[in-house]
Amino acid sequence: MFLKGLNISELDRFLTQDILRQESSKSNGKKISYRTKQILKWVYSKFQDDPNLFSDISKEIRKQIAQKINFRSLELLEYKISQVSDSIKFAFRTMDKEIVESVLMKHPGRYTVCVSTQVGCNVGCIFCASGMFGLKRNLGSHEIVEQLFLIQKFVFERENKRISNVVFMGMGEPLVNYNNVLKAIEIFTSDWGFNISKRNVTLSTSGILPRMYDLIKDNVRVKLALSLHSPFQKEREKLIPIAKRYHIDEVLKALENYYLNTKRRVTIEYILLRKINDSVSHAKELVRILKRYNMRVLINLIPYNNIGNVYFEGILLEEPEISRIREFYSILKEHFEVSIRWSLGRDIDGACGQLRRKIISN
Ligand code: SF4
C-alpha cells in the first residue's frame, strides 16, 4: 500500500477499516476524515512524508501508519543543475532499481516539473533516448506522484517555493499508462493534494487515439499536446512508428474534439530535424492540414537536442540552422500561435531519457 497512490477516499477507507477502528467507533466516524485530512496535509501541504514526524497524531497511530503504509518508493540518485538555463534534472531509483527521470524548469513566477510515466517507452520515436531501451514497465501512480513530491520538497526546503505547473512529457507515453496517469492527475489537482490547477497540467501524447477520446469521456480537462513532428502520414510513421496504427487525420480529429469539448487551447509539438522535417514545404503543409480543423492551437517548435549518432534514412539527426528555424517559424506564425522551445539544459542531458541512459551505461 503506497500512500502517494491513494486518493482521499481510498486512504480514508483504509484508515477506517484497518488502523482507526477504535477511534472510529468512539467518534462515529467523524475523526476518520479528520485523520485522513491531517495525513494528506502533512504530505501535500507541508511536504513531509515521514510519519514519525506527524506531530499532531498520536504515537500509537503513527506507528501503525508507518507499519502498514509505504510512504516512499523512490530514492533520489542524483541531480544536475544546468549552467545555461534555470533547470535541474533529477534521476530517481525505484524499489526494483529502475531509473526514472524528471526535470524542474524555473521561469519567473512559474515552476514546472516534467514527470515520467514509464520506465523506457515502446513508441519508438527515432529521436528519443527513452525509446532506445524499449519499455521496461509502467510507473505506478505513486511513482509518478512521488517525482513531483520529491522535487516539490527539494524546492520548498531550499527556496520556499511551490510548483505551479506539471507537464507529462518525460520518459514514456502517458496514454499507454492511462489509469495510473489519471490517478496522478487527480492527486496533482485536488485541493487535498498538490492543488495545482488543471489549466497548469499538460499531457503530451504521440497520438494514442482511443485514449484521447477517453480523456474527453473521463472529463480530465488538462491541457493536451500532440507530438506531430511531420504533416505527412508516411514520414510521421517513420519518425514515430506507433503512428502506423493511428492515422494523422484521425489523431488531429481527436485533438479537435478535445478542444471542442474542453475549450482548452491544444498544442502541437514539432521537433525540428535538419534536412528531414524542417523544409518550407513541411511548414506549408503543416499550415494546410491544421487549417482544416476547428481548434485553437499553439505550435511548439523544438529544435532537436542531440542524443548521439542517430541516423534517419542516412541523414544524421541534427538541429537545423538558425535561419531555417526562423523561416519555418515565420511561415507558421502568419496563421497560428507559435513558440520555439529550446530544449532546456543541454549540459544536463536535458532530452528525455538521456540522463537515465548515461547512468545505465556508467
Ligand atoms: S518521445 Fe515520448 S513517446 Fe516517443 S519514444 Fe520518447 S518517451 Fe516515447
Image (cartoon, grey):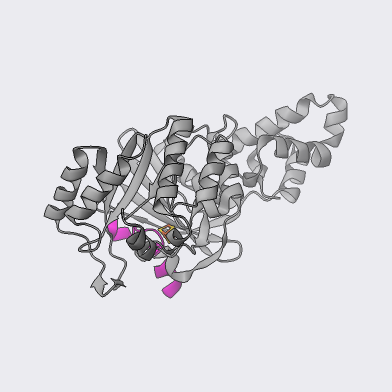
Q: Position of residue 241 (x, y in %)?
A: 42, 64
Ligand 1 falls in quadrant: bottom left
Location of the C terminus (image quadrant) = bottom left
Q: Is residue 77 left or right of residue 184?
A: left
Above or below — where is 222 with respect to 226?
above
Task: Give the magenta part as a residue range.
Answer: 344-362
Whether residue 201 is visible here, answered yes or no, is no
What count of labels does the image hold? 0
Q: Is residue 22 magenta?
A: no
Front position in the image: 226 or 162: 226
Residue at 67% in and 49% down: 2
Residue at 40% in and 52% down: 248
Residue at 35% in and 62% down: 234
Q: Position of residue 200 (x, y in %)?
A: 43, 35
Front position in the image: 45 or 353: 353
Furthest residue in direction left, as rendered: 323
Front position in the image: 342 or 243: 243
